[in-house]
Image: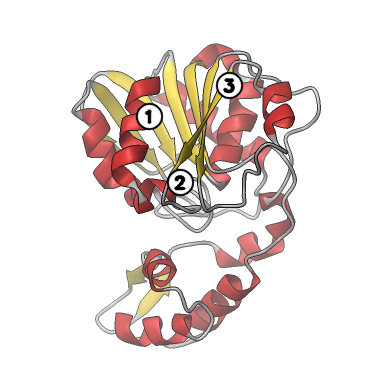
Amino acid sequence: MKLHTNIIGEGKPFIILHGFLGMGDNWKTLGKMFSEKGYEVHLVDQRNHGKSPHSDDFSYEILAEDLKEYIEEHHLEEIVLMGHSMGGKTAMFFAATYPDLLEKLIIVDIAPKYYKPHHQDILAGLTLLDKSDVSSRQEAAKIISEYVPDKPTQLFLLKNLDREGKDKYVLKVNLKTLKAKIENIGAALEEGKIYEGKTLFIKGEKSRYIKLPEDEDLLHNHFPNAEIEVISDAGHWVHAENQEDFYSTVIRFL
Protein backbone atom coordinates (compact mmCIF):
# COMPACT_ATOMS: atom_id res chain seq x y z
CA MET A 1 0.00 0.00 0.00
CA LYS A 2 1.37 3.41 -0.98
CA LEU A 3 1.08 5.52 2.16
CA HIS A 4 0.68 9.28 2.09
CA THR A 5 3.52 11.17 3.74
CA ASN A 6 4.83 14.66 4.38
CA ILE A 7 8.65 14.77 4.41
CA ILE A 8 10.32 17.68 6.18
CA GLY A 9 14.03 18.51 6.11
CA GLU A 10 17.13 16.53 5.21
CA GLY A 11 19.40 14.24 7.17
CA LYS A 12 18.93 11.10 9.22
CA PRO A 13 15.53 9.46 8.58
CA PHE A 14 13.03 9.93 11.43
CA ILE A 15 9.57 8.40 10.95
CA ILE A 16 6.67 9.52 13.15
CA LEU A 17 3.44 7.49 13.41
CA HIS A 18 0.23 9.13 14.63
CA GLY A 19 -2.40 7.63 16.92
CA PHE A 20 -5.92 6.28 16.38
CA LEU A 21 -8.08 8.67 14.29
CA GLY A 22 -5.07 10.93 13.80
CA MET A 23 -2.80 11.71 10.86
CA GLY A 24 0.77 12.73 10.20
CA ASP A 25 -0.27 16.37 10.00
CA ASN A 26 -0.88 16.29 13.79
CA TRP A 27 2.91 16.23 14.19
CA LYS A 28 3.81 19.02 11.74
CA THR A 29 5.08 21.48 14.37
CA LEU A 30 7.29 18.96 16.13
CA GLY A 31 8.34 17.50 12.79
CA LYS A 32 9.71 20.89 11.76
CA MET A 33 11.51 21.21 15.11
CA PHE A 34 13.17 17.80 14.71
CA SER A 35 14.14 18.61 11.11
CA GLU A 36 16.09 21.61 12.38
CA LYS A 37 18.27 19.18 14.33
CA GLY A 38 19.43 17.39 11.20
CA TYR A 39 16.63 14.87 10.68
CA GLU A 40 14.63 14.04 7.57
CA VAL A 41 11.22 13.72 9.22
CA HIS A 42 8.56 11.50 7.64
CA LEU A 43 5.04 12.25 8.88
CA VAL A 44 3.24 9.14 7.65
CA ASP A 45 -0.53 8.60 7.44
CA GLN A 46 -1.21 4.97 8.35
CA ARG A 47 -3.75 3.02 6.29
CA ASN A 48 -7.40 4.02 6.81
CA HIS A 49 -6.24 7.37 8.21
CA GLY A 50 -5.54 10.81 6.74
CA LYS A 51 -4.83 10.78 3.03
CA SER A 52 -3.62 7.17 2.86
CA PRO A 53 -5.70 4.52 1.06
CA HIS A 54 -8.62 2.75 2.69
CA SER A 55 -8.76 -1.01 3.16
CA ASP A 56 -10.96 -3.63 4.83
CA ASP A 57 -7.81 -5.04 6.47
CA PHE A 58 -6.46 -3.56 9.68
CA SER A 59 -4.07 -5.11 12.20
CA TYR A 60 -0.67 -4.23 13.61
CA GLU A 61 0.98 -6.94 11.55
CA ILE A 62 -0.45 -5.28 8.42
CA LEU A 63 0.50 -1.77 9.58
CA ALA A 64 4.06 -2.97 10.27
CA GLU A 65 4.23 -4.47 6.79
CA ASP A 66 2.96 -1.18 5.31
CA LEU A 67 5.80 0.60 7.11
CA LYS A 68 8.40 -1.87 5.82
CA GLU A 69 7.19 -1.27 2.26
CA TYR A 70 7.38 2.48 2.85
CA ILE A 71 10.96 2.24 4.12
CA GLU A 72 11.99 0.12 1.14
CA GLU A 73 10.25 2.47 -1.31
CA HIS A 74 12.13 5.48 0.10
CA HIS A 75 15.44 3.56 0.49
CA LEU A 76 15.75 4.41 4.18
CA GLU A 77 18.31 2.87 6.54
CA GLU A 78 19.02 3.00 10.28
CA ILE A 79 15.88 4.98 10.98
CA VAL A 80 14.62 6.55 14.16
CA LEU A 81 11.01 5.43 14.63
CA MET A 82 8.53 7.15 16.95
CA GLY A 83 4.88 6.26 17.43
CA HIS A 84 2.12 7.65 19.64
CA SER A 85 -0.68 5.46 21.02
CA MET A 86 -1.86 3.28 18.09
CA GLY A 87 1.23 4.42 16.19
CA GLY A 88 3.29 3.28 19.16
CA LYS A 89 1.78 -0.17 18.87
CA THR A 90 2.64 -0.24 15.15
CA ALA A 91 6.19 0.82 16.03
CA MET A 92 6.50 -1.96 18.64
CA PHE A 93 5.31 -4.65 16.22
CA PHE A 94 7.62 -3.28 13.52
CA ALA A 95 10.68 -3.13 15.78
CA ALA A 96 10.17 -6.68 17.03
CA THR A 97 9.74 -7.94 13.46
CA TYR A 98 12.35 -5.89 11.58
CA PRO A 99 14.93 -4.85 14.20
CA ASP A 100 17.77 -4.45 11.69
CA LEU A 101 15.99 -1.54 10.01
CA LEU A 102 16.02 0.60 13.16
CA GLU A 103 18.62 2.55 15.06
CA LYS A 104 16.37 3.83 17.86
CA LEU A 105 12.74 3.44 18.92
CA ILE A 106 10.50 5.91 20.77
CA ILE A 107 7.09 4.86 22.10
CA VAL A 108 4.74 7.59 23.29
CA ASP A 109 2.20 6.80 26.02
CA ILE A 110 1.27 3.21 25.20
CA ALA A 111 2.37 -0.15 26.59
CA PRO A 112 2.71 -3.51 24.80
CA LYS A 113 -0.32 -4.86 26.69
CA TYR A 114 -3.95 -5.43 25.67
CA TYR A 115 -6.41 -2.53 25.98
CA LYS A 116 -10.18 -2.99 25.92
CA PRO A 117 -12.07 -0.92 23.31
CA HIS A 118 -12.74 2.46 24.90
CA HIS A 119 -13.52 4.89 22.08
CA GLN A 120 -17.26 4.21 21.95
CA ASP A 121 -18.43 7.82 22.44
CA ILE A 122 -15.95 9.14 19.89
CA LEU A 123 -16.95 6.52 17.33
CA ALA A 124 -20.66 7.19 17.97
CA GLY A 125 -20.12 10.90 17.34
CA LEU A 126 -18.13 10.27 14.17
CA THR A 127 -20.76 7.79 12.97
CA LEU A 128 -23.51 10.39 13.32
CA LEU A 129 -21.27 12.94 11.62
CA ASP A 130 -20.58 10.51 8.78
CA LYS A 131 -24.32 9.97 8.24
CA SER A 132 -25.19 13.66 8.41
CA ASP A 133 -25.23 16.06 5.48
CA VAL A 134 -22.75 18.49 6.99
CA SER A 135 -22.18 21.78 5.17
CA SER A 136 -19.88 23.57 7.64
CA ARG A 137 -17.23 22.87 10.26
CA GLN A 138 -19.40 24.63 12.84
CA GLU A 139 -22.21 22.17 12.17
CA ALA A 140 -19.79 19.26 12.47
CA ALA A 141 -18.40 20.64 15.73
CA LYS A 142 -21.91 20.81 17.21
CA ILE A 143 -22.55 17.14 16.37
CA ILE A 144 -19.23 16.01 17.84
CA SER A 145 -19.68 18.09 21.01
CA GLU A 146 -22.78 16.06 21.92
CA TYR A 147 -20.56 12.98 22.28
CA VAL A 148 -17.15 14.46 23.12
CA PRO A 149 -17.29 17.37 25.61
CA ASP A 150 -13.52 17.93 25.67
CA LYS A 151 -12.66 20.82 23.33
CA PRO A 152 -9.09 19.75 22.41
CA THR A 153 -10.38 16.26 21.50
CA GLN A 154 -13.13 17.82 19.39
CA LEU A 155 -10.56 19.85 17.44
CA PHE A 156 -8.37 16.76 17.02
CA LEU A 157 -11.30 14.76 15.58
CA LEU A 158 -12.46 17.57 13.30
CA LYS A 159 -9.13 17.46 11.48
CA ASN A 160 -10.57 14.34 9.84
CA LEU A 161 -13.06 16.51 7.93
CA ASP A 162 -12.41 17.12 4.26
CA ARG A 163 -14.31 19.42 1.92
CA GLU A 164 -16.10 17.65 -0.94
CA GLY A 165 -17.54 20.12 -3.38
CA LYS A 166 -18.66 23.60 -2.40
CA ASP A 167 -20.91 22.94 0.61
CA LYS A 168 -20.22 19.41 1.83
CA TYR A 169 -17.77 17.92 4.31
CA VAL A 170 -16.86 14.23 4.57
CA LEU A 171 -14.62 12.16 6.83
CA LYS A 172 -11.17 11.20 5.54
CA VAL A 173 -10.83 8.37 8.04
CA ASN A 174 -12.16 4.91 7.06
CA LEU A 175 -14.72 4.72 9.86
CA LYS A 176 -16.36 1.52 8.64
CA THR A 177 -13.20 -0.58 8.87
CA LEU A 178 -11.97 0.99 12.10
CA LYS A 179 -15.29 0.22 13.81
CA ALA A 180 -15.29 -3.34 12.47
CA LYS A 181 -11.68 -3.90 13.61
CA ILE A 182 -11.85 -1.95 16.89
CA GLU A 183 -10.76 -4.98 18.91
CA ASN A 184 -7.48 -5.01 16.95
CA ILE A 185 -6.63 -1.48 18.10
CA GLY A 186 -5.96 -2.72 21.62
CA ALA A 187 -4.02 -5.85 20.63
CA ALA A 188 -1.04 -6.81 22.78
CA LEU A 189 2.46 -7.46 21.49
CA GLU A 190 2.79 -11.23 21.44
CA GLU A 191 4.84 -12.95 24.11
CA GLY A 192 8.37 -13.56 22.88
CA LYS A 193 8.40 -10.54 20.57
CA ILE A 194 11.53 -8.62 21.60
CA TYR A 195 13.44 -5.58 20.35
CA GLU A 196 16.90 -5.24 21.92
CA GLY A 197 17.81 -1.86 20.44
CA LYS A 198 17.78 1.45 22.30
CA THR A 199 14.21 2.34 23.22
CA LEU A 200 12.53 5.23 24.99
CA PHE A 201 9.05 5.01 26.50
CA ILE A 202 7.45 8.38 27.22
CA LYS A 203 4.51 8.54 29.61
CA GLY A 204 2.23 11.48 30.28
CA GLU A 205 2.10 12.04 34.04
CA LYS A 206 -1.72 12.25 34.07
CA SER A 207 -2.27 9.38 31.62
CA ARG A 208 -3.24 5.83 32.65
CA TYR A 209 -2.16 4.13 29.43
CA ILE A 210 1.19 3.23 30.99
CA LYS A 211 0.94 2.35 34.67
CA LEU A 212 4.03 2.62 36.81
CA PRO A 213 5.49 0.64 38.41
CA GLU A 214 3.03 -2.11 37.35
CA ASP A 215 3.99 -2.12 33.64
CA GLU A 216 7.77 -1.81 34.03
CA ASP A 217 8.51 -5.56 33.92
CA LEU A 218 6.33 -6.00 30.83
CA LEU A 219 8.06 -3.13 29.05
CA HIS A 220 11.51 -4.52 29.83
CA ASN A 221 10.52 -8.09 28.89
CA HIS A 222 9.82 -6.91 25.35
CA PHE A 223 12.33 -4.04 25.26
CA PRO A 224 15.27 -4.94 27.53
CA ASN A 225 17.20 -1.76 26.67
CA ALA A 226 14.30 0.60 27.32
CA GLU A 227 14.35 3.84 29.28
CA ILE A 228 11.14 5.30 30.74
CA GLU A 229 10.54 9.03 31.04
CA VAL A 230 7.50 10.71 32.60
CA ILE A 231 6.44 14.13 31.27
CA SER A 232 4.79 16.33 33.90
CA ASP A 233 1.56 18.28 33.38
CA ALA A 234 0.52 16.06 30.46
CA GLY A 235 -2.00 13.34 29.70
CA HIS A 236 -2.24 10.93 26.78
CA TRP A 237 -1.55 13.66 24.18
CA VAL A 238 1.73 14.36 25.94
CA HIS A 239 3.42 15.79 22.84
CA ALA A 240 0.73 18.46 22.53
CA GLU A 241 0.08 19.13 26.21
CA ASN A 242 3.70 19.71 27.21
CA GLN A 243 5.49 20.14 23.91
CA GLU A 244 8.58 21.79 25.37
CA ASP A 245 9.43 18.99 27.82
CA PHE A 246 8.45 16.33 25.30
CA TYR A 247 10.76 17.79 22.66
CA SER A 248 13.72 18.16 25.01
CA THR A 249 13.24 14.59 26.29
CA VAL A 250 13.27 13.17 22.76
CA ILE A 251 16.31 15.24 21.72
CA ARG A 252 18.19 14.10 24.84
CA PHE A 253 17.53 10.46 23.97
CA LEU A 254 18.55 10.94 20.34
Q: Amino acid at mark 3?
A: Ala
Image point (53%, 26%), residue name: 68
Q: Quadrant of the C terminus?
A: top left
Q: Residues within 10 Å of mark 3 (few under 14, many from 20)?
A: many
Q: Quadrant of residue 7?
A: top left
Residues at marks 2 and 1, CA–CA distance in whole angstroms: 16 Å
Instruction: Say which residue appears at 46% left-offset and 80% top-offset.
Output: 144
Q: At numbered mark 3, what does the secondary structure look like: helix, strand or loop?
A: strand
Type of amino acid at the residue the image marks with label 2: His
| Residue type highlighted by circle 1 | Val
Q: Quadrant of residue 56?
A: bottom right
Q: Report which residue position mark 3 lands on.
A: 226
Mark 2 or 3, nearer chain start: 2
141 on left or right of 147: left
Q: Label 2 vs label 3: CA separation?
A: 21 Å
Q: Which residue is mark 2?
A: 18
- Say whether residue 178 is left or right of residue 34: right
Tell which circle, 1 or 3, labels the residue nearer the N-terminal end: 3
Percent across and percent down for residue 177 are 63, 61
Q: CA distance from mark 1 to mark 3?
A: 13 Å
Seen in the picture, residue 181 relative to 189 is either above or below; the reply is below
Earlier sequence position, callout 2 versus callout 1 = 2
The residue singled out by tag 1 in the image is 250
Q: Nearer the viewer, residue 223 or 72?
A: 223
- Residue 236 position (above or below residue 200): below
| Mark 2: secondary structure | loop
